[in-house]
Structures are given as C-alpha cells and as structure tokens.
Amino acid sequence: MLVAAVAPLQVRAQMPGYMAKGTKPVTAETVSILQLIANPERYDGQRVQVIGFLRLEFEGNGIYLHREDYERGIPQNGLAVQLPSAITKEQTDAVNMHYVICLGTFVAAPRGHFGLWGGTMKDIERLQVWPGHAWDHQPSSGHEPASQ
C-alpha cells in the first residue's frame, strides 16, 4: 500500500527567493502538481505547497511539473502563478527558470492566460529556489535566522 506523506517540505530561510512577512511556519499540505491537475475540486481554495519548474514571462507566469514541459510548451502540465505585489525584481530574477518551492492557495479556476493551465496558484507566501536532494538538508520551517 502506498501512503502519501503530508509532512511539509521545508528549506532554509537563506534560500533565494520570496517569503512574505508574517508567513506562519508551514502547515499546508505538500502535494504534487499532478495531484492538483488530476483532482482540482479536492484542492480548490486550499493552501498547498508544491515544487516545480518556474518560468516568469509576460502572460505566462507558471510553475511546471518539469522543465521540459516549459521547453516543449505544455502549460497543461503546470499551474498559472499570480505573483504577490510585494515581490521584488531581485526576488523574481532569483527564482525565474529554477525549480522552486511554492506555498500559496490553489484555485481550479481561473486557469491562467487563455485557460491553458491546470489551475492557478495565488496568494503566494513563499517562492524560493528548491535546492534538490532535500534529504541532504536539515529540515527547517524557513524562519530560522541565517547562519553566520
């Protein structure tokens, strides 16, 4: 029997990217982009955390299951991303074209530009570069002070 882990994926606070001020330690369910696309009604309106490949571009901000989905132009394998107004250019430059961890609210509709996406991530609280091989890193809530 396969059991899905609900434990939050966590990275260190010094990871490049964006974390909203006042973001609470992660209590959102960590899900796959595939789960959101396959079962949008189950997750609609819920705070979730996903990992995927982020591309930020005019009328095409999205987080994809894989980098190749972006390269091959398959937005159905991704989610539209509504960036928070507080995010800076430096922060968007740090995460664009990288695998990221994204914490926000999933909505089944709207489905991004021309309705091409599998849903939308909005009210983003965290958008940070994902270091890969999470088992090599100490778990954290993302709120620890940067080490000296």
Image (spheres, rainbow, N blue to C red):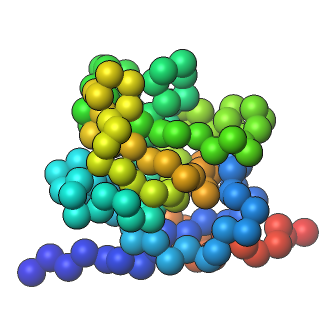
Regarding residue 101, the answer to whether it shows in the image is no
Q: Position of residue 6 (x, y in %)?
A: 35, 77
Q: Residue at x 50, y 44 (%)?
A: 99
Along the line of sight, the residue nearer the viewer: 1 or 86:
86
Along the line of sight, the residue nearer the viewer: 109 or 16:
109
In the image, taking residue 145 as reference, residue 129 lies left or right, namely left
In the image, taking residue 93 as reference, residue 42 lies left or right, namely left
The quadrant the C terminus occupies is: bottom right
Outermost residue, right direction?
Answer: 148
Q: Is residue 23 above or below residue 93?
A: below
Q: Residue at x 28, y 27 (%)?
A: 116
The quadrant the N terminus occupies is: bottom left
Q: Is residue 96 above or below residue 120?
A: above
Q: Position of residue 15 (x, y in %)?
A: 69, 55
Q: Quadrant of residue 97?
A: top right
Q: Position of residue 109 (x, y in %)?
A: 31, 43
Q: Position of residue 8 (x, y in %)?
A: 47, 74
Regarding residue 37, the answer to whether it shows in the image is yes
How many callouts does the rendering have?
Answer: 0
Q: Residue at x 46, y 72 (%)?
A: 28
Q: Is residue 8 above or below residue 84?
A: below
